[in-house]
Image: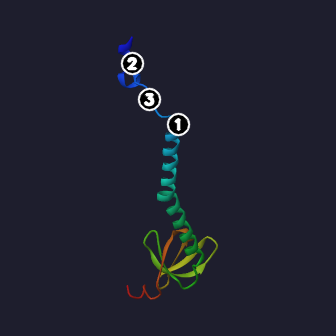
Amino acid sequence: MDFLISPAYAQSGAAGGGIMPTLIMVGLFFVFMYFMIIRPQMKRQKEHKKLLESLEKGSEVVTSGGIAGRIRQVGENFLVVEVSEGVEIRIQKNAVTSVVPKGTLESL
């Protein structure tokens, strides 16, 4: 019957050192995940929310689709953006990815 048990498991102490090292490793993994993934994502969300709150008429913006234009109207959830003279589109506020310095659109 001894041939069924591996020599490594038959030695005393080879079965493990208890549950504490495992819990410590799991805890370290969650701390690592928090600082590498969760915290930076929360920071980006806060910055995007602050960007959306600062939108005002006349600001020049770029959307997630790459459309650049000047804000003509600011609503609760939507913006009216002039992309060319006389051409206005309505977009969701969440689609705005960045605000560019004024005068950037004229240089294009």
Tell me if residue 89 comes above or below residue 31 in the rendering: below
Tell me if residue 38 comes above or below residue 83 in the rendering: above
Nearest to the observer: residue 20 or residue 85: 20
Instruction: State which tag comes first along the sequence, 2 or 3.
Output: 2
CB contact under 8 Å: marks 1 and 2: no
Instruction: Give how far apart the Cα atoms at labels 3 and 1 are.
Output: 13 Å
Instruction: Give how far apart the Cα atoms at labels 2 and 3 are.
Output: 15 Å
Query: Left of 80 or right of it: where is 9?
Result: left
**x, y percent for residue 11:** 40, 24
CB contact under 8 Å: marks 3 and 1: no
Q: Residues within 10 Å of mark 1 (few under 14, many from 20)?
A: few
Q: Residues within 10 Å of mark 3 (few under 14, many from 20)?
A: few
Quadrant placement of the C terminus: bottom left
Tell me if residue 14 comes above or below residue 44 in the rendering: above
Nearest to the observer: residue 59 or residue 75: 59
Identify the residue at the far top of this view.
1
Q: Residue at x 49, y 41 (%)?
A: 21
Q: Secondary structure at mark 2?
A: loop
Q: Residue at x 44, y 29 (%)?
A: 13
Q: Secondary structure at mark 3?
A: loop
Query: Left of 73 or right of it: where is 70?
Result: left
Q: Which residue is mark 1?
A: 19
What amino acid does circle 1 point to? Ile
Q: Which mark is residue 5?
A: 2
Identify the residue at the far front of this view.
12
Q: Which mark is residue 13?
A: 3
Which circle, 2 or 3, is nearer the viewer? 3
Identify the residue at the far right of this view.
76
